[in-house]
Amino acid sequence: MRKIFHFSLLLCSVAFGSGARAESVLFLNPGSTREAFWVSYSQFMQAAARDLGIDLQIQYSERQPELTLAQARVALQGEHRPDYLMFVNEQYVAPQILRMASQSGVKLFIVNAALTPNQQSLVGERADRIGSLVPNDEEGGYLMMQELIRLHPPVAPGERIELLAFSGLKITPSAQLREKGMQRALAEHPQVQLRQLVYSGWTQERAYEQARQLLGRYPKVSLVWSANDEMAFGAMRAFAEAGKVPGKDVLFSAVNASPAALQARLDGRLSALLGGHFTLGGWALVEVHDHAQGVDLDQYGGRDRQIPSLQLIDREQARQLLAMGAAPDYGVPFRKLSAKGRPPTYRYPFNLQMLMH
């Protein structure tokens, strides 16, 4: 099976001065090199690694959890082990990786989807698991649904607004949490009727095929909630082929600040767009770098943290993010975000506003 490696190797002396060694980090990217979100996620990490002087390696598993586990096994039990292994609890692979890591000497950091409460109780506390950083997925699903409902024209008393929802994979924590947020918003708006929730596996083609069928079944749908941008575009294509105008006849929402999604937000085809969590890996590298420098992460907001990285993106922000995507360093001073030498009241300022200038 072909493994795809991305290397960002840096001379230690550049960041640390002569004699110091850069910490090595391997990130197991659960996505595909064809997915805009996971590619942008890696690019932001590479920008952080360059600024921080980290020796970063990224391996993609093309959404195959068995490949993630094979990569982890080589990293944790092979001859050339990284100082830190960063990974996502995608499809609940974390406990197996933690078992492999035992006695390896490699320190672990989980991003995007952390241990579930059940997993945490089974695994217990581990000195080699130095932290986790996750987005506000449940709140994100809620905010996106609320925004769609807010933008929908008023309906007569007793009349229903019909909704279709496209989610990712049933066994992906981020999909489950975003759905939960959507359902919380719906409980507050009984005039909105969820006609059907389908699982499209995060892919455009699957959502397109499903939307074509669902349109025939529910021709009065005027809201479409999607847990990522690819699925939103697939559903949008099916509706457009049926003669419905996205942004007018039907309001669409999506998650991910990909160039295509940002452009669709500017064009008005996407009425509600949520993004910012592509930054999590880069922010996590700031914490890893601090840990390598002897910083006690528990003193600065705890080692396990959720941050509000998912935010609604308005048109002006979409414009800024599109322009920024062309800059290789994103204009973020990663080194200046360090907690080293700061008072215990300091909190890492990880949010989308850090990217807005």
Image (cartoon, rainbow, N blue to C red):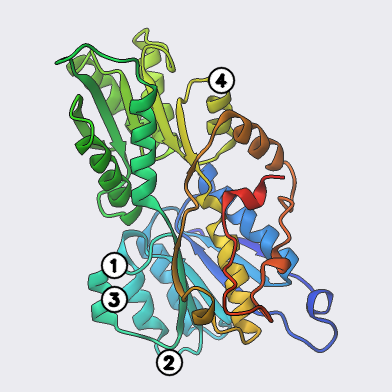
How far apart are the two marked residues, 1 and 4, measured between alpha carbons?
38 Å
Give the camera-side residue of 32 and 83: 83
Q: Earlier in the sequence, mark 3 or mark 4?
A: 3
- For marks 2 and 4, the one nearer the N-term is 2
CA gap, disc 3 and disc 1: 6 Å
Q: Residue at x 69, y 72 (%)?
A: 54
- Residue 203 position within the rendered picture, expressed as x and y whole percent measured from the top left: 39, 38
**Which amino acid does the dot numbered 1 rest on?**
Thr
Residue 208 in sight from this viewpoint = no
Residue that carries the numbered disc 1 in the rendered image: 116
**Badge 3 amino acid:** Gln
Q: Considering depth in this image, is 311 or 55 the residue closer to the camera?
A: 311
Q: Residue at x 34, y 85 (%)?
A: 125
Residue hosting label 2: 103
Position of 26 compared to 182: left or right?
right
The residue under label 3 is 120
Q: Residue furthest left?
A: 158
Q: Quadrant of the N terminus?
A: bottom left
In the rendering, at what x and y percent does residue 252 appear? Answer: 39, 25
For numbered disc 2, what is the local secondary structure? loop
Report helix, strand or loop for mark 4: helix
Q: Measuring 32% from the left and 44% from the top, which residue is drawn there?
A: 168
Which residue type does callout 4 highlight?
A: Asp
Q: Is residue 248 above or below residue 356?
A: above
- The C terminus - image quarter: top right
Residue 291 point in image, percent of width and height: 59, 81
Element class at badge 1: loop
Q: Are marks 3 and 1 in contact (CB under 8 Å)?
A: yes
Q: CA distance from mark 2 to mark 4?
A: 53 Å
- Residue 296 drawn above or below residue 219: below
Residue 245 is tagged as: none
